Image (spheres, rainbow, N blue to C red):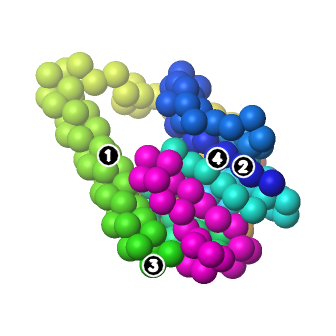
């Protein structure tokens, strides 16, 4: 069976660009989730990884699989180990040729995955710079200083952090995996303990 994996970060983004070359015999897996969330933790990513009938997957571009080099390479390894061929449409290349790994694919994908990760880091840096400029101009609309979020609001805001902590990850690993500060992870942990008391 053939499948097409689509990912957009927010509901207001358009899917059309990723559906242009869709074939009627493809099963669609569509995630509306940040590329920073590991593939194996995305709702549709999980379904796709567990679907034993899928042997051919198409993605529009490699950054649809993720924005983290290690995560992308881990996902590709899973596909290889299970004899699943991946086609990256915007490059016109496939991961397997005659049932064997395509060395050119691995090289190109490694470079592009690295670029995707770099782009995300650059975007976050620009965002931080923009916030600093807005603060300097008195335009920043962040949480009002001194206001307090309820424990429930904090917990609702960080479901990925909660999941990682419940898995037994350390505070530092959780911060890294969820792309949040160490202070945020500690705050979530404290709220979890207070709620469960």
The residue pinned by badge 4 equals 5
- The answer to whether residue 107 is above or below residue 124 is below
Q: Tell me whether the residue at label 4 lies in contact with that at label 3, contact meaning CB atoms closer than 8 angstroms.
A: no
The residues bearing labels 2 and 1 have C-alpha atoms spaced at a distance of 32 Å
The image quadrant where one finds the N terminus is: bottom right
Q: Quadrant of residue 153?
A: top right
Q: Nearer the viewer, mark 3 or mark 1?
A: 3
In front: mark 2 or mark 1? Answer: 2
Residues under numbered marks 4 and 2 in contact, where contact means CB atoms less than 8 Å apart: yes
- In this view, the mark in front (4 or 3): 3
Judged from the image, the secondary structure of the residue bearing numbered disc 4 is strand
Q: Is residue 189 among what the camera can see?
A: no
Pick the front one: 7 or 35: 7
Q: Residue at x 55, y 26 (%)?
A: 16
In front: mark 1 or mark 4?
4
Instruction: Tell me the tag on residue 8.
Output: none
Label 4 – label 2 distance at C-alpha: 7 Å
Between 185 and 66, the one nearer to me in the picture: 66
Residue 133 vs residue 51: left or right?
left
Q: Which mark is residue 3?
A: 2
Disc 1 and disc 4 in contact, CB within 8 angstroms: no
Check disc 3 and report the residue beneath it. Answer: 103
User: Residues in magenta?
Assistant: 81-101
At x 28%, y 38%, the residue is 127
Q: Dot 2: within a 10 Å radius of its alpha carbon, few (fewer than 14), some, or many (20 or more) residues?
A: many
Q: Earlier in the sequence, mark 3 or mark 1?
A: 3
Relative image position of residue 181 (x, y in whole percent)? 42, 55
Mark 4 or 2, closer to the camera: 2
Q: Give residue 10's quadrant in the image.
A: top right
Q: CA distance from mark 2 to mark 3?
A: 23 Å
């Amino acid at each position: 069976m053939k499948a097409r994996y689509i990912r957009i970060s927010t509901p207001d983004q358009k899917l059309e660009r990723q559906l242009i070359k869709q074939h009627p015999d493809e099963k669609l897996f569509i995630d509306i989730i940040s590329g920073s969330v590991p593939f194996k933790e995305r709702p549709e990513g999980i379904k796709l990884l567990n679907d034993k009938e899928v042997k051919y997957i198409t993605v529009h571009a490699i950054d649809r699989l993720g924005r983290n080099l290690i995560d992308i390479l881990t996902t590709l390894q899973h596909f290889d180990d299970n004899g699943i061929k991946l086609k990256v449409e915007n490059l016109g290349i496939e991961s397997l040729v005659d049932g064997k790994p395509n060395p050119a694919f691995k090289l190109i994908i490694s470079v592009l995955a690295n670029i995707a990760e770099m782009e995300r880091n650059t975007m976050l840096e620009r965002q931080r710079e923009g916030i600093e400029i807005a603060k300097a101009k008195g335009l920043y609309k962040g949480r009002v200083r001194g206001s307090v979020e309820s424990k429930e609001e904090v917990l609702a805001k960080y479901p990925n952090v909660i999941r990682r902590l419940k898995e037994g990850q350390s505070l530092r690993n959780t911060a890294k995996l969820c792309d949040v500060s160490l202070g945020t992870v500690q705050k979530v942990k404290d709220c979890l303990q207070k709620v469960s008391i």
